[in-house]
Image (cartoon, rainbow, N blue to C red):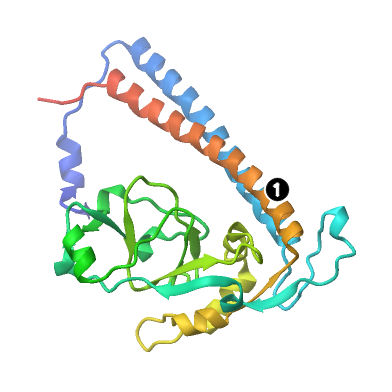
Amino acid sequence: ISTVGTYTIQNAKVTKFLCPTVEKEQQKIAHCLSSLDEVIGLQAKKVQALKQHKKGLMQQLFPAEGETTPRLRFPEFREAGAWEVKRLGEIVEELQDGNWIESKDQSSVGIRLIQTGNIGVGGFIQKNNNARYISEETFKRLNCTEIFPGDCLVSRLPNPVGRACIIPAIKERMITAVDCAIVRFDKNIVVPYIFILLSQTPAYLSVAESHAFGSTRKRISRGNLSKLKISIPSLPEQQKIAHCLSSLDEVIGLESHKLDALKNLKKGLMQQLFPQEVA
């Protein structure tokens, strides 16, 4: 007998479940939920189309690997020349590793420990259900470095190496783990969001991967991270690109929120339309 976990096909054959005895009620429920499924499907396609549109724009607005000029520029910057190539260490005010926090140092409440799992490709991953903390006493004993909303974190571990995000305001004090690099940019040189966008491009990720080493699990050292070469335009052009793509991010966020709301609506409807327990 085929099994899925401990639930066998034989189990399925004898499992009892409740269903409406009136055929019209079944049809009514099916029509209601299938109609909602169609709306959810259309909204999911809309979100995906917006994400693809952003991806396409980024491919045009940022130089391809090995190039220093993008294929698409705003009219006022078309004669501005090639983007300037700089090492990451040249455009930051601070670049340091997070703190070495062992399991025995962690607690259930206190100061939030941000880990590599919280760093997505270009975005912060909340993971509230798996949040880790350290106590105030541990924070002082280990002389930890506090991080703040607006700081950039770069993962020194896969996957992929070098992915980055900006820390949002999560209304908690925070520190970060040793495999997360804390980056505070010189805002007279670079708009931090521009680096976050660059960190999502194949060109950047390829360079970051080439600087990672390790026999079992590759990682990029802080020193090698500081040596990564990136191409950036003038500050006004950065600001123009940032405004364009952040506006698109807002639209994607709103449409994604609508998608989540529709999914929650369906979940709530199903809880109301179907019995919760079978005796």
| Residue found at the very far right of the displayed protein | 79
| Residue found at the very far bottom of the displayed protein | 215
Q: Which residue is mark 1?
A: 244
Helix, strand or loop at label 1? It is helix
User: From what the image shows, is residue 26 above or below residue 90?
Assistant: above
* Residue 122 spot, x, y in % from top left: 52, 58
The residue lying at 28 percent from left, 24 percent from top is 271
Q: Does 1 sit left or right of 263 as displayed?
A: left
| Image quadrant where residue 278 sits | top left
User: From what the image shows, is residue 236 above or below residue 50?
Assistant: below
The residue lying at 74 percent from left, 66 percent from top is 233
* Residue 203 spot, x, y in % from top left: 64, 73
> In the rendered image, is residue 128 in sight?
yes
* Residue 9 spot, x, y in % from top left: 21, 46
The residue lying at 48 percent from left, 84 percent from top is 223
Q: Does 175 sit left or right of 134 as displayed?
A: right
